[in-house]
Amino acid sequence: DACDAGTYADTEGSASCTSCGAGSYASSEGSTACTDCPAGYHSSSTGASSCAACDSGYYSRSGEASCTKCSGGEYSGVNATTCQLCPVGRTSPTGASECDACDAGTYADTEGSASCTSCSAGTFLNATGQAACNECPPGRAQSSTGQSACSECEAGKYSRGGNTECSQCSAGHFQSMKGQTNCSSCAAGRIASSTGSSSCTICDTGTFAAAGSASCSKCDSGRWSNDTEGAQNCSLAPVGTYTRVGASAPLPADIGYYTDTVGASEQMPCSALNSLLTTLEKGSTSCDACVADYYFSNNEDGSASCNKCPR
């Protein structure tokens, strides 16, 4: 009798037929040999009359009893003879029939990746299926990994790009707007005493500050300031006046006192020149009067004197 499909007899006078081994087949009766399953097909049992195609996500070489699962980062269709590598920006688990695009915030930068990598802090990715992440642009930052966007810097802060955190404006500087790349110096007469300031504070009268200052300084004695918009420096007290530290206005010399230089920090008593000398009004620059019962006269040598009034 002829051997059934799936069996063979390879010698004359055989008493029985032999089943085809796994990985081979005989499709017709009376076969004298079995044929290996072609690549992409398999037969897992003996005595097969045909081979089955490998499912998608699997492959086989010629004469194999089973299909092999594609590794992570690979994929295949049905009756595949080999698995293909996933392109950049896509990944797959084992036994995949196709590759999946990496989500926003993740990437795959090499072919055959089994998993996507999260974008590092300071970077972002707002599209799927990408091979690389983008640095956060200037004025923005991102402290977390795997993000699809960067956060705008708040007022009082800034970033130059690719930052994980926005930097605070240093003392003496400010930034009033969001999403900025630098800070500005406080104008003269204004200060920012702390870091991260969104505005500057006007110095009080009697004080001053240079541009970019963190604190206001009191006017020295002999100087003053009454600028309500903030002073860059203090003015010298004019003759006839004097000031103490932190003055917002010069003080006129009292009656009996005088100042004869600018920037005086004290008023001078006329009595120090002559016990009979005095002044008739405040703010005098010299002693040009005498006390009661005496009259004032200028001497030939330029000095002044007080003489007793005649009775």
Image: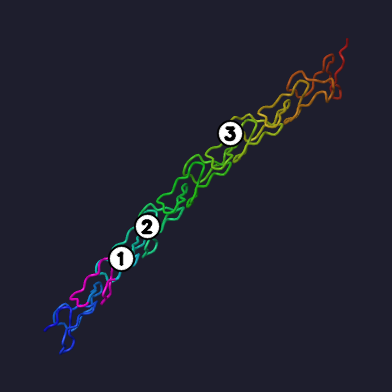
Q: Which mark is residue 284?
A: none
Label 3 sits on a secondary structure element that is strand
Label 2 vs label 1, nearer the camera: 1
Quarter of the picture holding the N terminus: bottom left
Residue type at mark 3?
Ile
Label 2: which residue? 130
Spatial CA span between label 3 and label 1: 70 Å
Q: Disc 2 vs disc 3: Cβ atoms closer than 8 Å?
A: no
Q: What amino acid does circle 1 point to?
A: Gly
Q: In the rendered structure, find residue 202 and report the number of the disc placed on it.
A: 3
Instruction: Measuring from the top left, give residue 236's x and y in whole percent.
Output: 69, 31
What is the span of residues highlighted in magenta in the rendered image? 46-67
From the viewer's perspective, tell me whether residue 136 is left or right of residue 190.
left
Quarter holding residue 301: top right
For the image, the number of numbered tags is 3
Residue drawn at x 37%, y 61% as measured from the top left = 115
Q: Position of residue 181 (x, y in %)?
A: 50, 46
Q: Nearer the viewer, residue 292 or 21?
A: 21
Dominant secondary-structure state across the stretch colored magenta:
loop
Instruction: Residue 206: say if magenta.
Output: no
Read off the residue under disc 1.
95
Residue 287 location (% of width, % of height): 79, 22
Q: Disc 2 and disc 1: Cα gap in Å?
A: 23 Å
Mark 2 → mark 3, Cα distance in angstroms: 51 Å
Would you call the spot at circle 3 few (<14 residues within 10 Å), some (14-19), or many (20 or more)? Answer: many
Relative image position of residue 184 (x, y in whole percent): 54, 42
